[in-house]
Amino acid sequence: MRRAIGQFLRIDVSPRGVSVQRASRWQGLPGFGAAGRGGVPDVLAAQTIAPSADHPFDAIANALRAVLGELDVQGWPVSFVLADELTRMWRVTPPAGAARMADLEAAAGLRFQSLYGEPPSAWQLSADWNAAQPFFAAAMPRALLAELQVVAQDCKLSIVAIEPRFVSAWNRGRRGLKQGAWFGHVHDGLLTVAATEPDGKGLRAVRSLPIPQGADQHWLTQTLQREALLLDAEAPSLLQVNGEAPAAWLQPGGGAGRIACSALTGSAA
């Protein structure tokens, strides 16, 4: 398959299935879509996965081999995007007087263990390391990363990135956030809310919330107001979302006391 300049494969990975998409680094630029000119990624192949509690990563690797074996994509660069349920994300407060990267890594590891009840040795950690203020860290299973490396090598693909789905969505969408807005990502029936700092330049908290059947703008407003109370913060004036947001959230003119919601342009699910 011929590859245009700037194109790459984006492979979404979850315990329930994998999806191979043709995407482009020009996504979001006027006149260009994620696949070059279409506006959305071009799905090339997908496969569901039968749940496997004993060998979940083997099941993912087998599904990837099956779909990639049907495509002529040897030599393509690939970016893997992992479902949030396969990854972990948490906030880390740097220790007082932290001066070395080792201090920050130790703080992230200790916080991980206190939250999840296991040592971080089986996980690969990354973060926006900061010795002066709290920062967010993310972790991906080393066993899954090893499987992805082997699949890419067998299929002659060049890995350019592996990241959690929320991190991928946040990195693509944060520059489009308006002052006072929070960020939301909707996927697989979950709303992942990112409460931003008052200056809009960083994250204050990240929460994944199940979306009930028939959730409307009233539900959304109550949910965001409750999250703001838990954070001892002001509720947002606007939630900007990407992904599969319910149409009821995007209706204009929500009325007094309602938090408006709009689709975040220039980003895809």
Image (cartoon, rainbow, N blue to C red):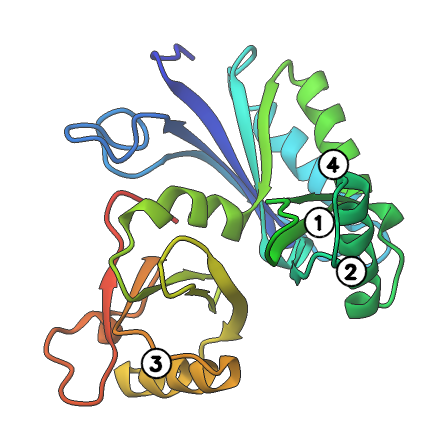
Q: Which of 126 and 1 is in front in this view?
A: 126
User: How many callouts does the rendering have?
Assistant: 4
Identify residue type, mark 2.
Phe
The residue positioned 28% from the left and 66% from the top of the image is 180
Residues marked 2 and 1 touching at CB (< 8 Å): yes
Q: Quadrant of residue 226?
A: bottom left
The x, y position of residue 41, in whole percent, is 35, 36
Question: N-terminal of the two: label 3 or label 1?
Answer: 1
Q: How far apart are marks 4 and 2 (CA)?
A: 19 Å
The x, y position of residue 94, in whole percent, is 70, 56
Q: Which numbered circle lies on residue 220? A: 3
Question: N-terminal of the two: label 4 or label 2?
Answer: 2
Residue 268 visible to an observer of this rendering: no
Residue linked to disc 2: 112
Q: Nearer the viewer, mark 3 or mark 2?
A: 2
* Mark 3 neighbour density, 10 Å: few (under 14) some (14–19) many (20 or more): many
The residue positioned 31% from the left and 32% from the top of the image is 34
* Mark 1 neighbour density, 10 Å: few (under 14) some (14–19) many (20 or more): many
Q: How far apart are marks 3 and 2 (CA)?
A: 30 Å
Q: Distance between the residues labelled 3 and 4?
A: 35 Å
Residue 67 visible to an observer of this rendering: yes
Helix, strand or loop for disc 3: helix
Q: Distance between the residues labelled 3 and 1?
A: 29 Å
The residue positioned 35% from the left and 47% from the top of the image is 173
Q: In which quarter of the image is residue 264?
A: bottom left
Q: Which residue occupies the extreme front position in the image?
A: 97
Q: Nearer the viewer, mark 2 or mark 1?
A: 2
Identify residue type, mark 4.
Leu
Residue linked to disc 4: 145
Residue linked to disc 1: 139
The x, y position of residue 191, in whole percent, is 45, 68
Residues marked 3 and 2 touching at CB (< 8 Å): no
